[in-house]
Image (tube, coloured by chain):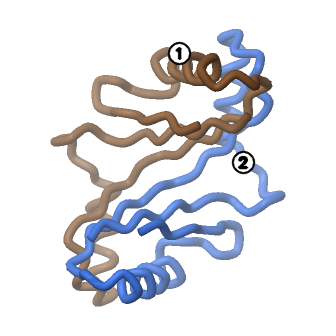
Chain colours: A brown, B blue
Amino acid sequence: MIVTVNIFLKQGVLDPQGKTIQNALHSLNFNTVKDVKVAKQIKIDLDETDKEKAKILVQNMCEEILVNTVIEDYEILI
Amino acid sequence: MIVTVNIFLKQGVLDPQGKTIQNALHSLNFNTVKDVKVAKQIKIDLDETDKEKAKILVQNMCEEILVNTVIEDYEILI
C-alpha cells in the first residue's frame, strides 16, 4: 500500500523557497502569480494492507523523524 | 485560484533522498517500509478565475522554469 505524506510549513513561517520561485516567475512575466508555497511530498510503499494500521504507522514516522513539528504541519493521504 | 503542482522524478531515475529516508525509517524499526519516493509540491496562488487559462499558464511555468523535464515529470491539480 502506498501512503502519501504532504509536509508543509505552518501558517506564518517564512517560505524562502516559495518567495524565490515567486520572484523568478515574476521575472518571466507571470505577473498573475500572487503567492507561491513549497511543500515536500513523500510516498511510502508499505508492506501493509490494513488502512488504519498504515495510517497510525505513518503518523508515528512523521512524529519521530519525517516532520519538524515546530515549523511544519503534515497531512496523510491513503 | 490555487493551483497545485507535484514534481517527481521520472521512473528509473535514482532517488537518493528517498533512499536516505528509507534507511532512516528502517533504522527506527519501521521494517514494513518497502520503498520511499520524495517529490516537491508547489502551490501557486493565481489572480485568475478561468480554470483552463490557469492550467495552461501553470503548464508554461513548469516547462519554462519549475520542472527539469530531463529527469522530472509533473502533474497539475486544480
Residue that protrudes farthest toward the top in the picture: B29
Displayed quadrant of residue B22: top right
Q: Height in image: A27 above or below A19?
A: below
**Near-viewer residue (B76 or B37):** B76
Q: Which residue is mark 1?
A: A60
Q: Measuring from the top left, give residue B47's x and y in whole percent.
A: 20, 78
Q: Which quadrant would residue A27 be assigned to in this image?
A: bottom left
Q: For this view, does B38 lie left or right of residue B54?
A: right
Q: Amino acid at mark 2?
A: Asp
Asked if both marks, 2 and 1, belong to the same chain, the answer given is: no
| Circle 2 SS class | loop
Q: Residue at x 54, y 82 (%)?
A: B63
Picture coordinates of residue A70, whole percent (x, y): 29, 24
Identify the subunit bearing mark 1: A
Pair 2/1: label in front: 1
On the image, numbered disc 2 is attached to which residue? B15
Q: Secondary structure at mark 1?
A: helix
Left or right for B13, reference A13: right
Q: Residue at x 47, y 65 (%)?
A: B5
Q: CA distance from mark 2 to mark 1?
A: 23 Å
Name the subunit of mark 2.
B
Q: Nearer the viewer, residue B37 or B23?
A: B37
Q: Residue B33 falls in which quadrant of the image?
A: top right
The local crowd at label 2, few if under 14, some if 14 to 19, many if 20 or more residues have their Cα within 10 Å, is some
Q: How many marks?
A: 2
For image coordinates 55% across by 71% down, the residue present is B67
Q: Position of residue A4 (x, y in %)?
A: 58, 40
Q: Are marks 2 and 1 in contact (CB under 8 Å)?
A: no
Rendered residue at 70%/43% (across/down): B16
Left or right relative to A42: residue B64 = left
